Amino acid sequence: MTLADTANPTLTSSILYLDGISVSFDGYKALRELSLVLQRGEMRAIIGPNGAGKTTMMDVITGKTRPDSGEAMFDGKYDLTRLDEADIATLGIGRKFQKPTVFENHTVEDNLLLAVKAPRGVRATLFGRAEPGVRATIDRILVTTRLQDHRARVAGSLSHGQKQWLEIGMLLAQDPKLLLVDEPVAGMTDAETAATAELLREIARTHSVVVVEHDMTFVRELGVKVTCLHEGAVLAEGTLDQVSAHPRVVEVYLGR
Ligand SMILES: Nc1ncnc2c1ncn2[C@@H]1O[C@H](COP(=O)(O)OP(=O)(O)OP(=O)(O)O)[C@@H](O)[C@H]1O
């Protein structure tokens, strides 16, 4: 961080600060001077057509992709462009990919126990006799993710929606400050989609969240600020109504 940055109140007050991020793949510009600021405790929905750069942006945040230029800061002080993926996860950025990757042969509860933030070595001894603090965390997550009545079920027997919630629960078990959630409601029923919006709103009371999603009904249910990306940059930002009324957003995305 430079001296100029410490005097930048937008940076110091934000959980995530992206400024002028560019990424090229073999000459193709996936991100073009992308700038986005997420306040602490904010949930933001990211929309935009295929190829807009949403996944690439998430990859920059998690250290999977290094930008060619620009600034990416976390929690007002950590330079994400200089840290590797493991360091960034340890700092408190958790990511959930679109496809659920739960341990199908383990119970719901054991999946959460496996994910829980615990010192190395402790994890292996957790099964069957988890310490009370860990138990309380797991119980809380089971309630949040609507899985309290399914804790003893094998994860492979859950519905698609329940698997997604379990994976969100596994993310929560790591106690991240910032959650990145990629297309959580793809393939869900309308009822599951509505429940997921409610679940994320609950999580957003105590965490900062970035959600990438194409389902506009779901984005409306989230009721948060929306950023529409197009060709690697921000095309529009505001409430869903404001963004939806933007002629270019209609032209390149919503009107299609
Ligand atoms: N590793 C890579 N090598 C080459 N090109 C890539 C690579 N990753 C992404 N791209 C290209 O960069 C552009 C942005 O892709 P990205 O996956 O970030 O878009 P997206 O907004 O997430 O799209 P979608 O909604 O389809 O997931 C696309 O044109 C894509 O083909």
Image: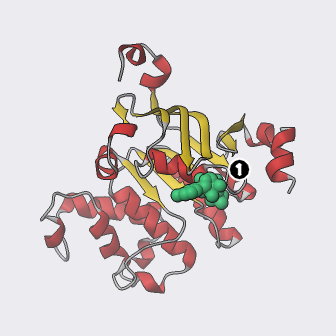
Side of 90 relative to 68 (left or right):
left
Mark 1: few, some, or many residues within 10 Å (few <14, many ≥20)? many
Residue 93 % position (x, y) = 39, 48
Is 233 or 152 nearer to us in this picture?
233
Specify the quadrant of the image occupied by residue 29: top right
Side of 54 relative to 58 (left or right):
right
Residue 128 % position (x, y) = 19, 77
Residue 119 % position (x, y) = 16, 57
Task: Please name the amino acid that badge 1 sits on.
Answer: Gly
How was this image coloured? secondary structure
Q: In which quarter of the image is the N terminus?
A: top left
Count the numbered circles shown. Answer: 1
Residue drawn at point x = 60 percent, y = 61 percent: 183
**Does residue 199 show up?**
no
Q: Hey, which residue is sitting farthest front in the picture?
A: 27
Q: Is mark 1 on a helix, strand or loop?
A: loop
**Does residue 28 show up?**
yes
Q: Quadrant of the C terminus?
A: bottom right
Side of 58 relative to 132 (left or right):
right
Ligand 1: does it lie within 8 Å of the C-beta at label 1?
Answer: yes
Residue drawn at point x = 38 percent, y = 76 percent: 108
Residue located beneath label 1 in the image? 48
Side of 191 relative to 80 (left or right):
right
Residue drawn at point x = 64 percent, y = 43 percent: 232
Specify the quadrant of the image occupied by residue 239: top right
Vertical arrangement, residue 145 with respect to residue 62, above or below: below
Q: In which quarter of the image is ligand 1?
A: bottom right
Residue 248 % position (x, y) = 83, 40
Specify the quadrant of the image occupied by residue 177: top left
